[in-house]
Image (tube, grey):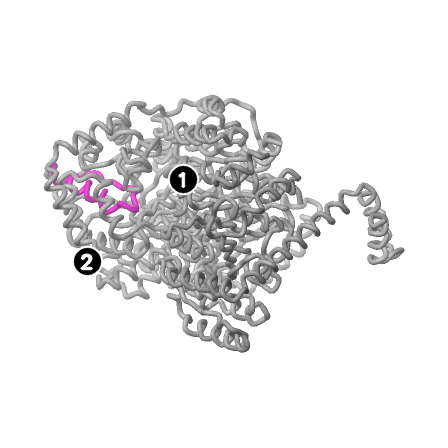
Amino acid sequence: MNDEKEIKKKRSEWEKEYYNNHIKKHPERKDKFENLSWNEIKNLYTPDDIAHLDYLKDIGFPGQYPFLRGVHPTMYRGRLWTYRLFSGFGSAEETNQRYKYLLDHGETGLSVAFDYPTLYGYDTDHPMSRGEFGKCGVAVSSLQDMEILFSGIPIDKVTTSMTINGPAAIVWGFYIANAENRGIDRRIIGGTIQNDILKEYIAQKSFIFPPEPSMRLIVDTFEFGSKEVPRWNTISISGYHIREAGSTAVQELAFTVGDGVEYVKWAMKRGLKIDDFAPRLSFFFNAHNDFFEEIAKYRAARRIWAKEMKKLGAKKPRSMFMRFHTQTAGCTLTAQQPEINITRVALQGLAAVLGGTQSLHTNSMDEALALPSEKAARIALRTQQIIAEETGVTNTVDPLGGSYYIEWLTDKMEEETYQYWDRVEKLGGVIPAIEKGFYQREIAEAAYKYQKEIDDKKRTIVGVNDYVMDEPIDIPLLKMDEKGEERQIKRLNKLRKDRDNQKVERNLNRLKKAAEGDENLMPYILDCVHSYATLGETCQVLRDVFGEYKEPVIY
Amino acid sequence: MGRKIRVLVAKPGLDGHDRGAKIVARALRDAGMEVIYTGLHQTAEMIVDAAVQEDVDVVGLSLLSGAHMTLFVDVAKLLKKKGMDDVLVVGGGIIPEEDIPKLKKEGIKGVFGPGTPCDEIVDFIKKNVKK
Amino acid sequence: MKDIAQKVLKGDARAVARLITLAENNDPVATEIMKEIYPHTGKAHVIGITGVMGSGKSTLICELTRAYRKQGKKVGIIAIDPTSPFSGGALLGDRIRMNELAMDDGVFIRSMGTRGMLGGLTSAVYDVVEILDASGKDVVLVETVGVGQAEVDVIKIADTTLVIIVPGLGDSIQTLKAGVMEIADIYVVNKADRDGVEQAVAEVESLVDISSANKERKTPVLTAVAKEGKGIKELAVEIGNHFKYLEKTKEFDKQRRLRYEAELVEIIRKELMNFIFDESTFKEKIEDLLDKISKKEIDPHSAAEEILGKILK
């Protein structure tokens, strides 16, 4: 049995007698050891650091409230996380090939990256799309592209995650329509649409419409999903991008889970019952460099979410447990000595697994240079397979539970999250805080501080500001088909000629009327999609009705 | 106070990654320059228009979406067309090494990839800006 | 140089921008051109806009400009932001909030740093107003840094001064009470969709009652929600009314005279300071004098007398 008071006393003695004397002769490497949220980390954590925690109440068992140790009782002993590599480039044909390659090599879930025009709801031939076709993802301008994208892929058996936000409802429409055209019932298809507009305003910036109509569209998808497409996660509430924009781990945690609560409140305002839609909410976190901080972050996220959902009246356990996807931090990977990124990604991926992620994307070593080459993507996939099969970390649930450091840090991050939420409350809530630039300012400050530390060499990035080499970067980079854009535009033009344009116009008009009212827009969107209205045409209708968002700019 | 180096930091096209552009803008300010950040979703025309009115010494373009060969070159060409030959054009973001010589030929004098310390950008500007 | 002057008068954007740079850098070439274009100034209505950070000045200016554009008026905007006293640099962040005005060649926006000048303006602002005026702008909007007790210089340059307030920012009204209240020709309570707007309006109106007690004109207090374009038409009308009032009561001449006086003083001040600081003996003497002052061998006044004595001879 541990007597925490006695331990605390003895620890103090140990520090005075042994530790302090030791460091007089052998000073520590730094004056202060800080993690990436600039929290100071002590030399040692002992039972008294977590004496305030009650195992049964605060830590508990996996699969049971507060779900700190994991959302399922068996976790990876029962089922491994999904190997889900985010990919997409050029035309639908090229990306279709890559998906088949990855599935052949053991990927267990698909994840679609779209190009910028698609993310903004523009067709490939829109003036703003100039030069952007296929450059950072696959171009999808219509149902036809979706058909090609998934041609020969068993979407009744494998789930698909789509990173799409502003036009998410429409792109989801493409996916559903494609499945149905292939004779696959919408009730059995599974996947996720990111559909998280709040973090677009905060970090990723691929928003289209202002907050109110965007939230309306999102709740429309919650409602439609819970009734019509029950195996679909209609949102992936994201912290990944917030972190990539430069936030600290605590900010990522606080802002993301805070966004989640906001979505739930909006849905409940519409009249939806929490237990009807909450089980299909999912999350998406970053796996950054500070190993233990990331693990504590995921655990804290689960506990906070469970508490908040309980407060909001959730009764079903499935409404309270947080399922999340993780992606290793792109912003930590370097252009210099790119092979060493493989090591970074392995460590980051390991943190995500020790944190209990449900699915994982591991970045490719050429992240800072180009879109992933086949080889680099394959190595990233193998990295996950090694973690799963060779390290033994999957033998038990939440292996780090009970670590004095981890439990202390988990608790601390939860505390700081609530402090952030207080500040947001004082500003009037999430959306007022966004409009006042609160999140953006916090992120910009953290980003600048971090960069200064690197430039001042207070923080080492191997290969960049230390262990530097003057070696030319020599790895094969992905080459894309130069003729792809031209082909796509030709295809679009043909599509617009061959389809029943009267039907398209009728459907677009009906969508417009519905958007002006308050009906659920998904059925109208599906009609447009089925008649081969393009993404740009459908989105334009919504732009006309909802307007476009202008962001308050904060440095 | 004498002459200040005036810099336009711009994000052409649809790319929404503004972390780097904002950090560079602050770093240039800390180095004594006057910095105008255009914000996102700028066309070449908008960027050059702003460059003319603000009579900047430097135009800095930031892009992570891979569309730099089109968009950076558009801006450089348009600046020349408007008689702004003496403006120093630099760029940063995700730009493969093999594209750099092509960009330099089109008038983008400095290209700063990932990992470039801010000081390097500041020094380059100070050294290469027209006197 | 004839070239630049002619181009400026024709409204050529590049020439206007170049001349502004020359003026800002105290280039002697600029002085010559300014002399040439001065006869063509005086037509533009100069409107100064001041208010605390976060009051929505830039958005308001953007909307007001659009209203003026609809009336076919050409608009020049001078957006001033603080220069860092430490680095000497500045983040000029107003233009970005006016992206909607991009690509309209009836609008010219110039961002400027205060470059060491207190008062909310920059020392070159008089020249820049005149350049925009001479280039054919009907309205010149000057957005100052903020409103604090020192930032009242805007009244020297503007025909019409707007003070923007927001509800809930208790500070802004406190600042007004601290003595800045008399500078406004028009008050605008922006972000009027927020809580506390009636209270804010009431507070300002009571200040207006006191300060307008013995004056001919009662300062109007308007409300607006600039980001939605609400209240802008009314504002434009009031500004127009103020201009008419100035013309009718000859206040206009008085106002312009104040501006020219401020400009003259500023030009002389700059010339004298430059003269003194460029004087080679000053550069030699200053370090020496600073040493002596630190050691208490001489006091600052006597030191100044020494420098001035040499120059004024």
Q: Nearer the viewer, residue A411 or B74?
A: B74
Mark drawn on residue A517:
2
Q: Magenta residues, as a range?
A: A156-182
Q: Is residue A522 magenta?
A: no
Depicted C293 relative to depicted A160: above or below? below
* Residue at the spot of label 1: B42
Q: Secondary structure at mark 2?
A: loop
Q: Report the residue at 86% width, 57% height from top.
A: C302
What residue is shown at x 52% (from left), y 34% (from top)? Answer: B115
Q: Residue at x 48, y 22 (%)?
A: B105
Question: On screen, A308 above or below A164?
Answer: below
Q: Quadrant of residue A374?
A: top left
In depth, the one of C11 and A23 nearer the eye is C11
Q: Type of residue at label 2?
A: Gly
Q: From the viewer's perspective, is C279 left or right of A452?
A: right
Pinpoint residue C121: horizontal percent, then vertical percent: 59, 54
Q: Amino acid at mark 1?
A: Gln
> Around disc 1, counting alpha carbons within 10 Å, would you say few (fewer than 14), some (14 to 19), or many (20 or more)?
many
Disc 1 vs disc 2: which is toward the camera? Answer: 1
Residue C247 visible in the snapshot: yes
Q: Chain of mark 1?
A: B
Q: How many marks?
A: 2
